[in-house]
Amino acid sequence: MFLSASSFSPVYSFQNDRSITGPPCHLPQCRRYDIVSPRRKGKKQMFHTVTYDGTREEQYGTVIRQLEALIEDEPNAIANLANASALLAQFLADINWAGFYLLDEQGLVLGPFQGLPACVRIPVGRGVCGTAAERKETMLVPDVHAFPGHIACDAASQSEIVVPLLTADGRLIGVLDIDSPILNRFDDIDRVQLERFAAVLSARLG
């Protein structure tokens, strides 16, 4: 499932540094998320509404443009990773965790995320995240329980996709990790588009 009607969150509108929450929208024409590109007027940040329309690729394209707008003027890595994880958590249906593990001298350490508390450290080469980091390639796992050495941070997770964050010269920054409570949640469209998402973010982080 992708952007299923039952998974829509309340619509958030941001204007003049105030947040206004409206009722949930369960209609197909209401697939929208208001935290979009900031438009500066003086010292205020203004946001406008967009709608997730079109094919899945086109919807991902909208999310990637939102990411670009959110990170373009912010040099702080933690802030950008936090907004990126929040953006994915609002956009993707049927997921229970979205966030980042960052590489340090001891392996992968937990970064900004949306979801339940998670494993703090993962060795490179272990589990889905560690394998993606070691190979520097995306791991798309339809059934995490069938993955050798899977690290179960959340027993509800059934499928997972992990995308490496790489600099232009191939240096590993960390990984983007997304879990779902549904088997076979992710497919090749998700892989390709999340790799695009990760590339935009990595270019800013690197």
Image: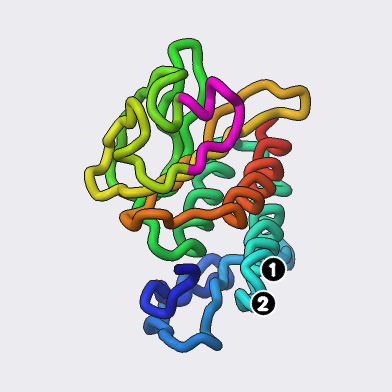
Q: Residues within 10 Å of mark 2 (few under 14, many from 20)?
A: few
Q: Which residues are magenta?
A: 131-140
Q: Does 172 appear in magenta?
A: no
Question: In this view of the protein, can residue 49 be seen by the observer?
Answer: no
Mark 2 highlights which residue? 54
Left/right of residue 59 with respect to residue 21 in the rendered view: right
Dividing the image into 4 quarters, which one contains the N terminus? Answer: bottom left
- Image vertical order of residue 46 relative to residue 85, above or below: below
Q: SS for tag 2?
A: loop
Left/right of residue 65 with respect to residue 179 in the rendered view: right
Q: Amino acid at mark 1?
A: Glu
* Mark seen at residue 123: none
Q: Could you tell me residue 61's position as x and y percent?
A: 69, 62
Residue 172 picture quarter: top right
Q: Could you tell me residue 68's position as x and y percent?
A: 70, 53
Question: In this view of the protein, can residue 86 be seen by the observer?
Answer: yes
Q: Amino acid at mark 2?
A: Gly
Q: Does 132 appear in magenta?
A: yes
Dividing the image into 4 quarters, which one contains the C terminus? Answer: top right
- Image vertical order of residue 134 relative to residue 75, above or below: above
Q: Could you tell me residue 186's position as x and y percent?
A: 49, 54
> Residue lying furthest front in this view?
146
Q: Could you tell me residue 155's position as x and y percent?
A: 22, 44
Task: Tell me whether the residue at label 2 lies in contact with that at label 1, contact meaning CB atoms closer than 8 angstroms.
Answer: yes
- Image vertical order of residue 1 relative to residue 112, above or below: below
* Mark seen at residue 58: 1
Left/right of residue 24 with respect to residue 199 in the rendered view: left
Residue at (73, 67) in percent of width and height:
41
Residue at (77, 23) in percent of width and height:
169
State the CA–CA distance, disc 2 to disc 1: 6 Å
